[in-house]
């Protein structure tokens, strides 16, 4: 279903995760069958070799002699890359890492392969809470960055990955490289706008959304970038409007905190209900019901209030005297 939906949308509005689902989502049983045909060992065997894999300080190919890459090797590496991504999306991280390792032995300077390998390393690091794998993921990202300096699409996706992993400084530098390669790069301009927003540089946000609007491919993207530009221009020019928006966001945060408190109270009332029913004491049970129902009612009110406050103030909003 996700592939059917994503395939009908422009790629510029999809993030990295959505693009991976579009390109590599497959049935887990078929993916495992392909792994068996490619002679990828099962998890039990690969688990023992994880420490040896992590001990490779520079690059997976350093202990092997790399021969000149021909068409056959490139095709095999591409098949392994696709299999590795399918394994990663199915949650088989160790087998995915092994498939990437074999592909890198065939085409060690393939920037797209290095990029996908780095994302697999980072996913595996999150799953295992392993800092060494996370550091290795960033090192491989730098290799991918150096390996391809003329492909604006790969550079933009590298920038999005750096942004996703919290390295805003590196993401900004990569986005600028991508724009230098191809000035009409919507993804890079959108990424620069997001970074400028988080740094509080509203004028830069307006500038990047204006450029993104100029090259947007679809009416929906043009409408979105135009509305974002108008909204942030209003914030930048009108202090009263900015104060209203800041207060709205603060109220949303406060309502969210009240919701969490109500949920805690609801769960605290459940033991009273259970205890009252167990000892056949209606008073205790009724107190528990009263506490839980009142908290539930307030929780529902907070949902309605948050829904009403979720929408931004219209940029043409003016206070009436």
Image (cartoon, rainbow, N blue to C red):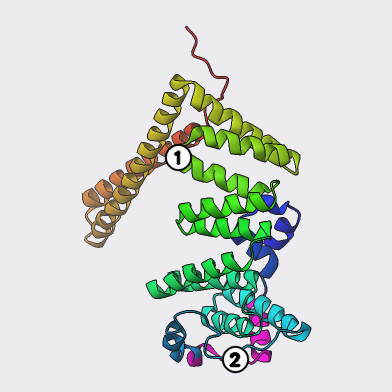
Q: Nearer the viewer, residue 182 or 43?
A: 182
Frontmost of labels 1 and 2 is 2
Q: Look at the image and tell me whether residue 45 can be seen.
A: yes
Q: Nearer the viewer, residue 187 or 321?
A: 187
Give the main secondary structure of the magenta stretch: helix
Q: Nearer the viewer, residue 165 or 317?
A: 165
Which residue does the numbered mark 1 point to in the structure image? 303
Is residue 315 one of those drawn in magenta? Answer: no
Q: Looking at the picture, how far across and down is residue 166, in whole percent? A: 45, 56
Name which residue lies at 50% across and 73% down: 121
Q: Relative to 50, say whether 163 is above or below.
A: above
Which is more N-terminal, label 2 or label 1?
Answer: 2
The stretch of residues the image draws in magenta is 27-45
Is residue 28 one of those drawn in magenta? Answer: yes
Q: Look at the image and tell me whether residue 220 can be seen.
A: no
Q: Looking at the picture, how far across and down is residue 204, in whole percent? A: 53, 36
Q: Looking at the picture, how far across and down is residue 203, in whole percent? A: 52, 32
Give the class, few, some or many, for how many residues have Cα within 10 Å of label 2's Cα (few <14, many ≥20): few
What secondary structure is found at the residue carrying circle 2? loop
Horizontal side of 289 relative to 19 (left or right) equals: left
Which residue does the numbered mark 2 point to in the structure image? 65
Q: Nearer the viewer, residue 35 or 122?
A: 122
């Amino acid at each position: 279903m996700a592939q059917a939906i994503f395939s009908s949308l422009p790629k510029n509005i999809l993030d990295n995760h959505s693009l991976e689902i579009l390109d590599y989502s497959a049935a887990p049983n078929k993916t495992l069958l392909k792994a068996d045909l490619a002679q990828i060992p099962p998890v039990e065997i690969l688990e023992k070799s994880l420490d040896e894999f992590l001990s490779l300080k520079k690059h997976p190919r350093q202990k092997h002699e790399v021969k000149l890459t021909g068409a056959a090797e490139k095709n095999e590496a591409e098949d392994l890359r696709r299999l590795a991504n399918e394994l990663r999306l199915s949650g088989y991280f160790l087998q995915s890492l092994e498939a990437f390792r074999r592909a890198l032995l065939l085409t060690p300077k393939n920037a797209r392969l290095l990029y996908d390998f780095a994302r697999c390393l980072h996913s595996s690091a999150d799953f295992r809470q392993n800092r060494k794998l996370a550091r290795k993921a960033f090192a491989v990202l730098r290799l991918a960055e150096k390996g391809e300096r003329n492909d604006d699409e790969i550079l933009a996706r590298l920038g999005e990955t750096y942004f996703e992993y919290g390295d805003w400084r590196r993401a900004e530098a990569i986005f600028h490289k991508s724009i230098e390669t191809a000035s009409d790069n919507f993804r890079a301009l959108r990424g620069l706008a997001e970074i400028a927003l988080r740094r509080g540089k509203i004028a830069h946000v307006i500038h990047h959304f204006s450029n993104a609007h100029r090259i947007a491919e679809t009416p929906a993207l043009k409408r979105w970038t135009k509305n974002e530009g108008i909204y942030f221009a209003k914030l930048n020019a009108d202090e009263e409007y900015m104060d209203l928006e800041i207060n709205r966001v603060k109220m949303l945060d406060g309502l969210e905190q009240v919701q969490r408190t109500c949920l805690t109270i609801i769960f605290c009332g459940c033991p009273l209900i259970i205890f009252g029913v167990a000892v056949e004491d209606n008073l205790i049970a009724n107190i528990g019901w009263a506490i839980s129902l009142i908290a539930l009612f307030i929780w529902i009110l907070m949902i309605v209030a948050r829904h009403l406050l979720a929408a931004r103030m219209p940029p043409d909003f003016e206070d009436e005297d």
